[in-house]
Image (spheres, helix red, strand yellow):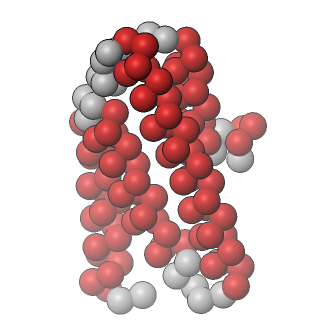
Amino acid sequence: MNPQAKLISISSLFLGTTITISSNHWMMAWTGLEINTLAILPLISKPHHPRAIEAATKYFLVQAAASTLLLFSSTTNALFTGQWNVTQLTHPISCLLLTTAISIKLGLVPFH
């Protein structure tokens, strides 16, 4: 991989993580997570081998499904509570969906 491309990918990972950690709004948290997903894909598919491309494709599809679930849970929370703040997650269905989405994104045990 080109050194400049690798530098951009790694700096995008840091940028996405920083945006996610420092956000107070669900859309900014989602944006940071998507930047992380798109920054890690070239690093996964770096060796041009069919298994690496397959792994990157599977990773992208699973992360896209988890991002959709995260957006759905934040929209559901905003519908019931009227708040888009990260700290105002009070509706039980939204909380369960968000926990599931973050578990999928982290690759926790039932979702690995």
The spot of residue 94 in percent (x, y) is 52, 21
The spot of residue 17 in percent (x, y) is 33, 48
Q: Residue furthest right?
A: 110
Q: Residue furthest front?
A: 79
Location of residue 4 with respect to 65 vertically, above or below: below
Q: Quadrant of residue 1?
A: bottom left
Location of residue 61 with respect to 46 vertically, above or below: above
The spot of residue 41 in percent (x, y) is 49, 69
Residue 106 in view in this figure = no
Give whichever of 14, 100 is nearer the camera: 100
**Left/right of residue 20 with respect to residue 69 in the rendered view:** left
| Picture residue at 71% right of the left edge, 47% below the top | 112
| Picture residue at 58% right of the left edge, 27% below the top | 97
| Picture residue at 65% right of the left edge, 39% below the top | 108
**Left/right of residue 12 with respect to residue 40 in the rendered view:** left
Residue 97 in view in this figure = yes
Q: Quadrant of residue 53?
A: bottom right
Location of residue 18 with respect to 49 vertically, above or below: above
Q: Quadrant of residue 79?
A: top left
The spot of residue 68 in percent (x, y) is 52, 44
Give whichever of 93, 45 is nearer the camera: 93
| Picture residue at 56% right of the left edge, 53% below the top | 63
**Left/right of residue 108 with respect to residue 41 in the rendered view:** right
